């Protein structure tokens, strides 16, 4: 009964209900081997996705905090440099305009553009990585 499945059927014979078993053949050894290979591939792919997701969680938390700090400093440093330069210019040159305010504004704009460019590059890298991962997964599922 190890390679065959039995299916019970009931029929009425000679006034009594008797139970007869009908033998249903199982899958061929070649088909069984192919099914096992498919199962192994699928389990392997799921395990890879699970491990990548676990690594991605820890990395994404630190990446997010690091990105937040980097973006903050990329805006703050040009703004502070603008303020410092503006204070120096205001102290040494007489002008009707406040160089401190103008250079603070310019420094903030430069910092925001720099942060925006950095975030756009990181986002592009993430999308390319996901696209490459999806292509690799797609190739792995169709090649036997």
Image (cartoon, grey):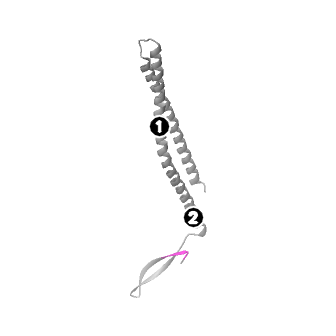
Between the residue at mark 2 and the residue at mark 1, the CA separation in whole angstroms equals: 49 Å
Tell which of 47 and 57 is nearer to you.
Answer: 57
Tell which of 30 and 53 is nearer to you.
Answer: 53
Disc sitting over residue 69 in the figure:
1
Q: Position of residue 59 (x, y in %)?
A: 50, 46
Which residue is labeled 2 in the image? 36
Q: Residue at x 56, y 69 (%)?
A: 27
- Pointer 1 local density, CA inside 10 Å: few below 14, some 14–19, many at least 20: few
Which quarter of the image is occupied by the C terminus? bottom right
**Residue 37, image quadrant:** bottom right
Give the total of numbered labels.
2
Magenta residues span 2-6
Can you name the residue that lies furthest to the front here? 91
Rendered position, 37 above or below 79: below
- Pointer 2 local density, CA inside 10 Å: few below 14, some 14–19, many at least 20: few
Task: Kindly state the secondary structure of the residue where label 1 is placed.
Answer: helix
């Amino acid at each position: 009964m190890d390679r065959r499945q039995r299916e019970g059927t009931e029929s009425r014979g000679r006034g009594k209900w008797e139970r007869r078993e009908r033998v249903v053949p199982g899958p061929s050894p070649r088909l069984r081997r192919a099914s096992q290979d498919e199962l192994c591939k699928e389990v392997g792919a799921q395990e890879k996705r699970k491990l990548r997701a676990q690594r991605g969680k820890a990395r994404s938390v630190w990446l997010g905090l690091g990105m937040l700090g980097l973006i903050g400093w990329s805006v703050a440093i040009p703004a502070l440099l603008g303020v410092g330069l503006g204070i120096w210019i205001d102290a040494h040159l007489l002008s009707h305009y406040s160089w401190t305010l103008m250079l603070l504004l310019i420094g903030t704009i430069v910092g925001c553009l720099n942060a925006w460019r950095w975030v756009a590059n990181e986002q592009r890298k993430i999308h390319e990585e996901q696209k490459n991962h999806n292509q690799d997964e797609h190739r792995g599922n169709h090649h036997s």
